[in-house]
Amino acid sequence: QFSTSMLALRAKLPQEKVRYMPEVSELKLADYTSKSKRTGVIARKKGMTAMWDEWGVRVPVTVLQLENVQVVSILKTSNPGLARLQIGCGTRKEKNVTKPMMGHFKAHGVEPKAKLFEFPITPDAVLPVGTEITAAHFVPGQLVDVTAPSLGKGFQGVMKRWGFAGGPASHGNSLSHRSLGSTGNINPARVYPGKKMPGRMGGKNVTVMRLPVMKVDTALNCIW
């Protein structure tokens, strides 16, 4: 079902990760099932606000906006029952795009994108190349998994980074109120790998699962 097209071959792309542009007739679209996996999207955080649910409970929400999100290419995988959609968002000037990437965009007939990401999908959720994905891709009440870089907090101690209790606040303590304490035994006379110690905190990808979609605005292309 995921055959290689001549257009992808002419682009001289690696054979183990061949991109192809199937015709609309090749896409065997079907009704979604419980095992269907749709594509995700790339969104930009615009800020935070609050909403009230049906019980009057105030819920903090994040506002995400979809900016020119399009299907750039379809990737064949070694599993015949799975594929990967390459999604792009934003815009980028042609002078700021490398020639290999510019050729990739032109081969698939899409404008240069600022960011690309791949999402695994099932065959019944394949979208044609060039399809624009809007906020209508989601419905209120839907549960989604969100991945984004956490706020970087710099070099932090063990009390802030790992929640250590610290030393005694008084009575016999000198200059060790926030220290980590012992780092190991006299035998084997070394620090075990993975020991919780001071270090850089935040600035890493964090995934929060099963967040409910509170609101969808197709005019502004935003989701709450």
Image: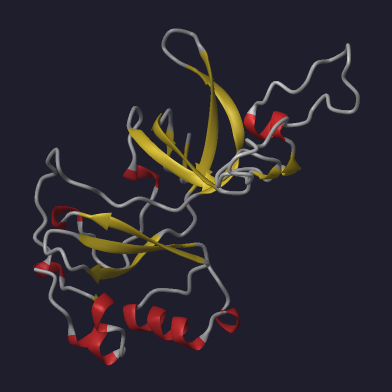
Q: At 11% across and 64% down in the image, what residue appears?
A: 80
Quarter of the image that includes the N terminus:
bottom left
Q: At 35% across and 78% down in the image, what residue appears?
A: 109
Q: Residue furthest right?
A: 174
Quadrant of the rendered structure where residue 196 is? top right
Across and down, in percent, residue 195 comes to 59, 40
Quadrant of the rendered structure where residue 201 is? top right
Quadrant of the rendered structure where residue 137 is? top left
Whether residue 88 sits left or right of residue 153 in the image: it is: left
216 w.r.t. 135: above or below = above
Across and down, in percent, residue 38 comes to 25, 49
Whether residue 40 sits left or right of residue 82 in the image: it is: right
Q: At 36% across and 37% down in the image, what residue appears?
A: 144
Q: At 60% across and 83% down in the image, what residue appears?
A: 95
Across and down, in percent, residue 112 comes to 48, 74
Numbered-mark total? 0
Viewer-nearest residue: 132 or 194: 194
185 w.r.t. 27: above or below = above
- The answer to whether residue 219 of the structure is visible from this angle is no
Whether residue 154 sits left or right of residue 212 in the image: it is: right
101 w.r.t. 58: above or below = below
Across and down, in percent, residue 103 comes to 41, 86
Whether residue 54 sits left or right of residue 220 in the image: it is: left
Viewer-nearest residue: 16 or 85: 16
- The answer to whether residue 10 of the structure is visible from this angle is yes
